[in-house]
Image (spheres, rainbow, N blue to C red):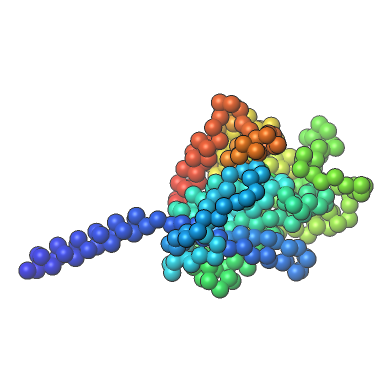
Amino acid sequence: MKNTVIIIILITLFISCTQQKEKTFRIGQKSIAFIDESKNRPLQTEIWYPTLDTLTKKVVKENQKELFKTIETIPNAKIPNEKFPLLIISHGTGGNRFSLTWFIEKMVKEGYVVVSLDHYGNSTFNKIPREFVKWWERAIDIQFVLTQVLKESEIGTKIDTSRIGGVGFSLGGYTNIALAGGYVDRTVRKNEKNKERKMPTEFPETDEIIDFEKDSLIVSSYNKYKNHVKDKRIKAFFVMAPAIGFGFHSPEQTDKITAPIFIVAGKGDLIAPVKNNAEKYHNLIKTSEIHLFDKKVEHYVFLNESTEFGKKVAPAITMDNPTVERKKIHEKTLELALEFFKSTL
């Protein structure tokens, strides 16, 4: 009789564990318009989170003019009553909070809450010239939104605050390095062949004449925030094709970084060439690991997969080398990210 009871208990535990492993999360989505009133800085934010709710009605989009493929989510779904790790994402120059939904989709299904936001003045539909060069303020955006999300009455209470990670692409990669404790030095120009740096193609047109090196608003912002944005709440960082390597010149700029950082980039990147960006960061950051894809893999491969419409109207950011399958690069990147966060959070 005693042996029978033990067997029943073991079978029950096995079934319970199997069910737990087989739990299939879908993607809940909540939109919040945060405002950093201290700086009059609106920060449109999406919170993507695991849910066991089912999608009762598929939304058919009438507008077929999407550049990138979208993902299926359940707006304002319920979040299970358990604790989840959190990842917060910083998009690239002129991008937006939906730029990396391929990454978001997988991570949420694996049990992560993911937060993404539009950086003020440097996002697709909100472009302000000065904000394109005040890179250091992006880290302040992340800190502010993270604080607000953790205060959120329902989702915030379900986050395991000991397991928070940062993710970024391009300028968002630099943003995460800043949050880890690195700081850009905009005063050193001796190694630059051309002191007049080219602005990114996403830079907004303006009739205003701005001296980006001496403008009082830019200089005062830099002096205030350049090396005061390390966030100890974020325990590990995963960065894709990080930019702004030209602003890093010495080990002192990264010596406060103690958290692990994983860098992913393509050797064919012409926007943020790996020699002066990904590899440079790796050489300067003692806690970093790096994975480089081959010379056929370029910068924008880390954006979402494109629609046929996107390939027609924006080939520069939607089309890759003919031998490169964007989906395959995404799959390998996700494999690296899951392994990295599994071991660091």
On the image, the x and y values in percent for residue 4 come to 10, 65
Relative horizontal placement of residue 122, taking residue 58 as reference (left or right): right
Relative horizontal placement of residue 106, taking residue 263 as reference (left or right): left
Residue at 77% x, 65% y is 39
Residue nearer the viewer, 85 or 280: 85
Residue at 65% x, 35% y is 311
Residue nearer the viewer, 192 or 8: 8
Furthest toward the bottom, the residue is: 153
* Residue 54 shows in this picture: yes
Residue nearer the viewer, 72 or 336: 72
Residue at 50% x, 44% y is 334
On the image, the x and y values in percent for residue 60 come to 57, 52
Residue at 45% x, 46% y is 339
* Residue 278 shows in this picture: no
On the image, the x and y values in percent for residue 61 come to 60, 51
In this view, 159 is above or below 319: below
Q: Across the whole image, how many numbered discs are drawn on residues?
A: 0
Position of the N terminus, as image quadrant, is bottom left
On the image, the x and y values in percent for residue 294 come to 56, 29
Q: Quadrant of residue 290?
A: top right
